[in-house]
Amino acid sequence: MLAKWIGLFSVIDFISAGMLVSVVAMNSLKRIDGCIKAYAANSWLLASMMGASAVYLSEPHLYAAAFYTIAVKCIGIPYVLKRVAKELKVTRETDPYVSGPVSTMASFALVGIVYSALSRGISVTGFAQNSLEVAVSIILVSLFTMMIRKKAITQVIGLLFMENGLFLAGFSLTRGMPTLVELGVLFDLFMGVLILGVFLSQIKKTFVSVDLDRLTNLKG
Amino acid sequence: MIFISGLCLFALATGLAAVAPERSLRYTYLLMFVGAVFAGAGSVLAVYAPPTAICVSSIIEYIPVSFAAGPLSGFFGLVLSAIAAPVSLYSAGYCPQGRTKAVLYGLFVLSLYALFYSADAVSFIIAWEAMSIFSYFLVISHTEDQESGRAGLVYSVMTHAGTALILAAFFAAYAVTGRFDFDGMRVGLAGSPEWIRSVIFCLSFLGFGMKAAIIPLHLWLPRAHPAAPSNVSALMSGIMVKAGIYGMLLMGFYVLGANVAWWGMVILVTGIICSVLGVLYVLMEHDIKRLLAYSSVENIGIILLGMGASALFASAGMRALAGLALAAAMFHVLNHAMFKGLLFMGAGAVHKATHTRNMEEMGGLLKRMPYTGLFFLIGCVSISALPPFNGFSSEWLTFQSLILGSQTPRIYMELATLLGGAALALTGGLAAASFIKAFGIPFLGQPRSAKAENADESNRPMILAMGIAAAACLALGLFPSGVLGLISKIPLSGLDQVSKAGVYPGMATRALLSPVNVAGGFAQIQPAGILAFMLAGLAALLVFLKIFWRRPKTVYRDSWDCGMQALTPRMQYTATAFSKPVRVVFKNIYMPKKEVSTVYALKPFFVSSMAYKSQIRPFFEEFLYRPALKAFDKLAMSAKRLQSGSLQLYLGYMLLTLLAMLVLWA
């Protein structure tokens, strides 16, 4: 019954569209708080997509994957990020290389390129046939965000978005990776965020700033 | 069953070493000794038994990990056990402290067992990497040494380059056959075109050659082996470089069949280069462990001579001769493991007693360490290929098989094998010269330093271990037939011919070495007979002296004193002086540099001090590696222009690359 509805209302496509919106939103938001919220929203959408696919495909191990995703990406990582942001006293991106409206336009352009490029060569069939474009767009837009921002914590958020995109691509193309692999990736990610948090506070101590353009001084 | 229980015992000892109190570490080494003895006995049984799987499992679906006991595995398991048993005993006396080293040592030996008994490429690579990593840790474990960190770096870089090549060979074989197990590869590659087989051969020859330290890939060996503790150097030189030989036998001979003429030529020419250049560098070394390390390069060359000749004969369809040459090579694998292990143990004992590895600071140790000296002498005699010890047996067989190369139908094969024979003869002579130096300078004469003067005899486990290895050297030399019978059971090219009547009569039955039918007029030799003859001659001489020679009045003076007094140790023949003639003869290869600096009190007659410095130029480093490194540096510097140091720019590069790929490929 539920599975039928999911198919009928193309829930999966809606959710992936929501993920795309959240990444574009992140790209234009300047407040760190907003970026973290966008990431949490993106993760919730990813988790709900997993849940929906679990119902739709009746694959029990996807329930477990959705559960892990909620625990790590929706609750754990945003919490850690918020604490780090508070500790570092960064509230907003002060002067990015590219201004907000321009970067929003650029992200639209990126999404357009992705859609036009992927519409030609690759044809994906199956339950998530429209997810690949969304996944690649998420990866590229978040990479673009990382490129134009200066604060280290934004870079971390961009990286996390990229990982969400990869996760989306991985599980929508393969009907879910083995549980062990997913668990390993999530654990890696969580550890990565913790370590990055420590590093950021160390960088702050050393350079009195978390602006990454100061790192140019390190060049030999 | 015996093998498994031996292995379990060894693993138990390794585990115990991790938890046992520091004082009782020596007992875990003794347990390892027992385990290695059992594993050796089990390996001998494995040679005779039909191939059996030991354990099969899989880490991931579709990728099996399997271990099996077969004749080839059994033989190398025997070689490993034969050296690991005395070295474990030796370690009980050599390094009774040092928990980390004990655990690493145990893991290192276990990984070698796993390597020799693995039946497919996946388990092989896992064991191979484990072996490399444990030996790397052991190389850098000698913290008192500044050099060892650098040695470890060179070692790990080169060994990983070798592993990459081996992986490429395995994947190429997998791509053709779809199989990871070696039996499947063998069947699958039998009908494939020659160029594919040649590619796989070249990849595996270079990859395994890195581990076997063929010249010019030998750079890591003279650095890493001396840097490791001596018990580990004994294993590294005795058996770990043989893992490279094992890989070549496995991929080149077992899987690919080794029946292409130019493969044989490649192996043979490499063998010639390794043996001659290796021994030339042995002569110039004054660090006793580096000397032994270079000597491993030389012996690998001798083994390669046999293997190359075997491949040549096999390509010409001469199965019996191919079998003979390969049997000689494999026999030398065992023999070299024994005497090189013995020599490294001896060198370790000397190092422990004198706290130096420089031979110029030793001297007169025979009086202070009589047993160590005796066993070191036996090792030196064996490695110099003098009868009745084991080095003679295998080198003589190699030599005979190379000379019999004159029976091959092609002129280039004939020339190559004869050239190999000439190289082997030269190598033997130079090796004898270098080991006269290696024994004479440290052990004879007067002590050259206070360190040597205060040296003490080694403790009992060390002496016992060296004694076992020395006895094995003698036994293998006197009764080669048993081992040759063992080798004839291995299913490699023509080895089954080795003991067949009519081709090699008596080889497997009597203590007789004979390459071909005696009626055909070819040489045969009986090492035990030589020993009997030597003993009889000695006895006759003693009797003769007893009867006819009246003892003159004996005066005891210092060694090499010629009856004069007040000779100082500085007047003795030094290691540098001993090798001077060779340095002059081969000066085109060594390119020696010498530097004499004199400080005058009053020019030109009154000299207050003189300093003499002489060193040889490391040919391969200077003319092969350094230019390559320089070119690489240049390339890296030109790539540096891309690096602004700005993270955002790097991310931009990535974004642009991704976009370009997306647009171009999709």
Image (spheres, coloured by chain):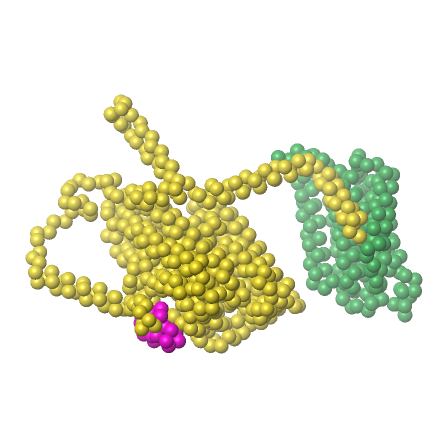
Chain colours: A green, B yellow
Q: Residue at x 64, y 63 (%)?
A: B175
Left or right, residue B80 beside residue B599:
right
Left or right, residue B177 beside residue B23:
right
In-front residue for pair B423/B553: B423
In-front residue for pair B112/B395: B395
Left or right, residue A119 beside residue B457:
right
Where does the image place residue B585, in percent across and percent down from the top left? 33, 44
Q: Residue at x 7, y 60 (%)?
A: B548
Residue segment shown in magenta: B499-516
Where does the image place residue B190, in percent across and percent down from the top left? 57, 69
Identify whether B65 is placed above or below B574.
below
In-front residue for pair B444/B255: B255
Q: Residue A62's quadrant in the figure? A: bottom right
Left or right, residue A26 beside residue B183:
right
Residue B395 appears in the picture as rendered: yes
Of all residues, the one furthest to the top in this rendering is B602
Whether residue B93 is in magenta: the answer is no
Identify whether B443 is placed above or below B517.
above
**Magenta-drawn stretch, dominant element (helix, strand or loop):** loop
Where does the image place residue B348, in percent across and percent down from the top left? 36, 53
